[in-house]
């Protein structure tokens, strides 16, 4: 039964481990916000561990900073200042000028700004899309729309679709070399980790400012920017893999000021060396705290929005794309690691299982980090959660089953053996497995002489009182010698040693227990006589041999932990022979052989084993030598062999 329980427990744990792994694989696919946020935090940790990466020096930021505001006046500035800035950057030889400032309201100096933008011929302007209904118009915007490959794929995963747009005023918009949206799509925790490479507006797909700027810098015309619907974007011969909605994970190079900041006032004052701007991408945007264009990113809690664009542009030009590991690979990892972990958890102790959990978590963390250094993101949270949940469930189930098993062992054995033995069985429940096993044990039978006639002379209540007191004293002695108390049968007691725990000295324990039982019986007898009660004399029979031991009976109804076999019958018959030989204790030759060296070396104190004779058990042909244990007489030998007299044992 214990074996069957173990098999059931193993299958149960394997099933639970598999179901947990499947559950987290499913959660990985649907990515519920309340869980996915934890995964994203682990993603952010990868940036922290990686640290700063040196970006290419081809992108610089013309910064609207505190120094410029203090010199040029309160923000927003008039258009003539931006006109001068564009002219100065063009004179410096900037390859591309991209604004993160929307000139959406008319001003008196709009013409000068439009002329400088038109003259530069390399200015990209931003637009912002909105998702609520409203009136808006920006005809030049559609000149930047992108072509689509496999547009039917958008029926499954459509890009973000806008209903309204905020554009520069027409006078300025007409002079621009292109447009790109600057919409942000923070994750549920407010952190900007992704960039939407395009958005849909009135049936047109408009690129983001970053991809438009990068394409212009690389000399890729608009018709060569082709969307591979739900898969990626072709930038000439370059390919940018995206998620099904056209978004990429932003490759951040580091924290604030990873890219070179040049104060706008220094550019206007001509204090900048030409090589700092020549043939570079210049992004114009706010970095001053008071303008409130600061974003939360994996690498910074307050990164200027213009620097987010710089990160995206630089990564596109360098081909640094953080690509999530394919879903089917992650699912395979969740399932296989979960099954392997469950297999190990089920076979190991709790402490070793914890070590396995830590090993698994460490392995996948370092694997994820190694992949991240190669710009591949392995989602960790669902793998970790699966492994940890399987560990907790396995330990909990094993604990619950072991507690149930412990309660079962305690219930079954607490009446048979000492508390120490019960605790040992709880630690090693296999020692008490049901169904029986062959084992060498020593069996003791005892009963009260003349109990039948005694019970006829006194009241039943007195009989019960006498028996209770007698059994109580005998049980104390039996448990003192750590015997397994099998049962009470009328006035008889059956005890054995050597099971459920292995006891190498089981024969010695049985004999010493019998000697103490006889002493206790004599003490009880003397007291009862003084109180006017009946005399008490008991007989004890002991035998040693191989028997079938285990919980035997009707499973789930009535079970007894007992021993059965010929050697049990012999022990019972030896107890009955005490009347024939007028002795109190008889042991078999099999028991004596187990303790012979103890008697010969005087380790049984004043006691000697005296042979009584050879007896034949009914149904057996070979005679058995029997002995009684008595105190030595003078210089008597410790072992006195019996005479060669054959006695046929009658039925008990």
Image (tube, helix red, strand yellow):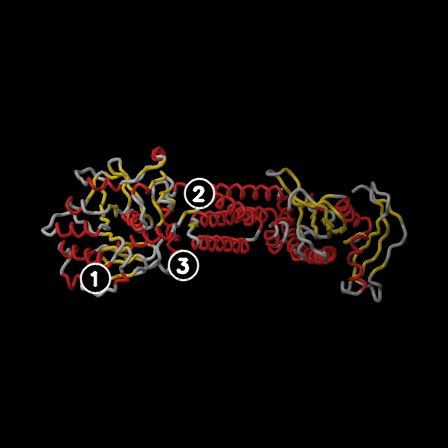
List x then y, in percent, for residue 517: 70, 56
Q: Kindly identify which numbered label has been placed on residue 50.
A: 3
List x then y, in percent, for residue 616: 85, 45
What residue is at 19 percent from the left and 49 percent from the top? 118
The residue tagged 2 is 327
Asked whether residue 532 is in view, the answer is no
Q: Crowdedness of circle 2 by 10 Å Cα count: few (<14), some, many (20+)? A: some
Which comes sooner in the sequence, label 2 or label 1? 1
Quadrant occupied by the C terminus: top right
Q: Quadrant of residue 529?
A: bottom right
What residue is at 38 percent from the left and 60 percent from the top? 51
Which comes sooner in the sequence, label 3 or label 2? 3
Quadrant occupied by the N terminus: top right
Q: Kindly identify which numbered label has been placed on residue 267.
A: 1
Looking at the picture, does residue 642 appear above or below residue 24? below
List x then y, in percent, for residue 146: 29, 40
Label 3 – label 2 distance at C-alpha: 24 Å
Q: Quadrant of residue 552?
A: top right
- Callouts 3 and 2 close, C-beta under 8 Å: no
Query: Mark 2: which secondary structure?
Result: helix
List x then y, in percent, for residue 145: 27, 40
Q: Is residue 461 left or right of residue 504?
A: left
Q: Nearer the viewer, mark 3 or mark 1?
A: 1
Query: Mark 1: which secondary structure?
Result: helix
């Amino acid at each position: 039964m214990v074996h069957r329980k173990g098999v059931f427990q193993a299958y149960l744990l394997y099933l639970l481990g598999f179901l947990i792994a499947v559950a987290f694989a499913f959660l990985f696919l649907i990515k519920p916000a309340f869980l996915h946020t934890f995964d994203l935090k682990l993603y952010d940790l990868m940036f922290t561990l990686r640290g700063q990466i040196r970006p290419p020096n081809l992108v610089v930021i013309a910064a609207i900073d505190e120094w410029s505001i203090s010199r040029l006046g309160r923000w927003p500035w008039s258009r003539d200042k931006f006109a001068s800035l564009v002219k100065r950057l063009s004179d410096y030889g900037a390859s591309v000028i991209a604004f993160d400032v929307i000139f959406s309201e008319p001003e008196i100096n709009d013409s000068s700004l439009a002329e400088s933008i038109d003259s530069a011929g390399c200015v990209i302007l931003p637009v912002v899309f909105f998702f609520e209904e409203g009136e808006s118009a920006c005809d030049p915007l559609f000149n930047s729309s992108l072509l689509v490959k496999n547009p039917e794929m958008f029926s499954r995963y459509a890009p973000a679709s806008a209903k309204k747009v905020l554009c520069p005023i027409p006078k300025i918009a007409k002079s621009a070399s292109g447009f790109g949206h600057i919409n942000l799509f923070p994750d549920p925790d407010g952190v900007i980790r992704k960039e939407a490479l395009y958005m849909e507006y009135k049936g047109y797909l408009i690129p983001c400012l970053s991809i438009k700027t990068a394409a212009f810098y690389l000399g890729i015309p608009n018709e060569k920017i082709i969307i591979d619907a739900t898969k990626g974007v072709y930038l000439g011969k370059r390919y940018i893999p995206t998620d099904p909605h056209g978004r990429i994970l932003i490759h951040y190079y580091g924290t604030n000021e990873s890219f070179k900041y040049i104060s706008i006032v220094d550019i206007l004052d001509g204090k900048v060396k030409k090589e700092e701007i020549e043939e570079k991408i210049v992004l114009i945007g706010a970095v001053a705290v008071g303008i409130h264009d600061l974003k939360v990113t994996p690498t910074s809690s307050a990164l200027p929005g213009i620097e987010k664009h710089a990160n995206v542009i630089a990564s596109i030009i360098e081909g640094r794309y953080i690509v999530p590991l394919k879903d089917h690979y992650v699912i395979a990892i969740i399932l296989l690691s979960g099954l392997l972990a469950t297999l190990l958890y089920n076979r190991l102790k709790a402490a070793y299982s914890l070590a396995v959990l830590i090993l698994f978590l460490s392995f996948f963390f370092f694997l994820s980090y190694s992949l991240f250094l190669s710009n591949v993101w392995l989602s960790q949270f669902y793998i970790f959660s699966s492994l940890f949940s399987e560990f907790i469930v396995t330990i909990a189930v094993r604990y619950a089953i072991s507690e149930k098993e412990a309660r079962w062992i305690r219930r079954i054995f607490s009446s048979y053996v000492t508390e120490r033995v019960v605790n040992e069985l709880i630690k090693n429940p296999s020692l008490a497995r049901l169904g029986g096993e062959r084992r060498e044990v020593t069996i003791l039978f005892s009963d009260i002489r003349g109990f039948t006639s005694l019970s006829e002379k006194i009241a039943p209540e007195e009989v019960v009182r006498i028996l209770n007191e007698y059994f109580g004293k005998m049980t104390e002695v039996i448990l003192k010698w750590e015997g397994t108390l099998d049962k009470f049968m009328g006035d008889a007691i059956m005890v054995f040693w050597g099971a459920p725990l292995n006891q190498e000295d089981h024969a010695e324990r049985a004999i010493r227990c019998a000697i103490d039982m006889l002493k206790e019986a004599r003490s009880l007898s003397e007291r009862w006589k003084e109180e006017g009660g009946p005399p008490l004399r008991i007989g004890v029979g002991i035998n040693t041999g191989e028997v079938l031991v285990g919980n035997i009976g009707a499973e789930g109804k009535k079970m007894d932990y007992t021993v059965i076999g010929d050697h049990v019958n012999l022990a019972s018959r030896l107890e009955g022979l005490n009347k024939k030989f007028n002795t109190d204790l008889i042991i078999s030759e099999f028991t004596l052989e187990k303790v012979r060296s103890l008697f010969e070396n005087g380790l049984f104190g004043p006691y000697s084993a005296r042979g009584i004779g050879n007896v034949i058990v009914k149904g057996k042909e070979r005679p058995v030598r029997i002995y009684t244990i008595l105190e030595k007489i003078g210089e008597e030998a410790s072992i006195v062999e019996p005479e060669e007299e054959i006695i046929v044992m009658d039925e008990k």
